[in-house]
Image (cartoon, rainbow, N blue to C red):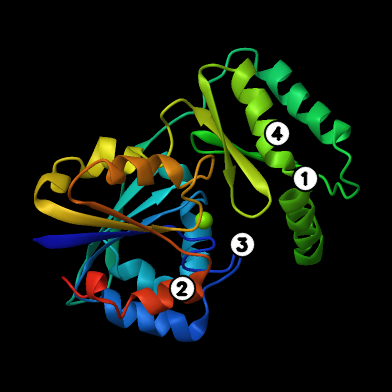
Amino acid sequence: MNTIYLFDVDGTLTPAKNNIDTKFAAQFLKWSKSRQVYIVSGGSFIRILNQIKRPIFDQVQGVFACMGNAYYTNRFNKEDGYSTWTEAYKNKFDIKKQKDFYAELDWIVKDSPFHIKTGRHYEERVGMVNFSIVGRNATMEQRKVYEEYDAKFKEREKIVEKLSKKYKGIDFVIGGAVSMDIFNKGNDKSQVIHRVLKDKLEDHRIVFVGDRIPFPGNDHSLASVLQTHKNGHTIEVESWRDTAKLLSTDLFASG
Ligand SMILES: [Mg+2]
């Protein structure tokens, strides 16, 4: 049985919000050459390209950006070395009383006891909103401070729980190291299977590697679909270093 490999980006192929390690990039490029590989990330198409770099990007079969809310397929031409990317679909984040909703997010930021708030607390992406208390202007150090704070006080879990109760048609999950992802119910990473790879799962083994598999992590929805299917495999990593080690194991040997 042939295998299809799916990889999350932040925390799985790269350090969160960072670019891929050069040595690992070379290893991954070599490994992925003869295999079917898809990228599944919360980031935008351009951001993923910047993170994992052109050579790997050109070699993968497809990219699911913005939590699977935008899907791009790739056709690589071996002769001229160019790839042709096609946008297969794109979702829209849809919420009634949008203004009130964003006002509520602002209020949650104000209300948080965490002391560093750097601005740009939410960002609208394709089919989703990314939300953080520390804000997108935060430096790596400030993000680190929040990460430690959140690990101790579970602030994001509490926010996600509170908002989930109030907004029934909307899903809230913990994404990345400091943020939360917000989207219409079902418009999460599980779309990778439900909308695109469903038929392939019947005669392919599908292996997914992610760093946020337990609920309410942003890899949970995709992982749980695969965990309930006999051909699905999921592997949780703590960093790209774990992923690097995985590539030489048996599960990653099949083409
Ligand atoms: Mg991740």
Q: How crowded is mark 3: few (under 14 residues within 10 Å), some or many (20 or more)?
A: some
Residue 104, numbered label? none
Whichever of labels 1 and 2 marks the residue nearer the N terminus, that label is 1
The residue carrying mark 2 is 242
Question: Disc 2 to disc 3, how far (Cα)?
Answer: 17 Å
Horizontal side, residue 184 vs residue 64: left or right: right
Residue 254 can be seen in this image: yes
User: Which of labels 3 and 1 is toward the front?
Assistant: 1
Secondary structure beneath dot 1 equals: helix
Instruction: Determine whether the residue tagged by mark 3 lies in a helix, strand or loop.
Output: loop
Mark 4, residue position: 158
| Label 2, residues with CA under 10 Å away: few <14, some 14-19, many ≥20 | some
Quarter of image, res 74: bottom left
Which residue does the numbered mark 3 point to in the structure image? Answer: 17
Residue assigned mark 1: 153
Q: Can residue 122 be seen from the camera position used here?
A: no
Check disc 2 and report its element: helix, strand or loop. Answer: helix
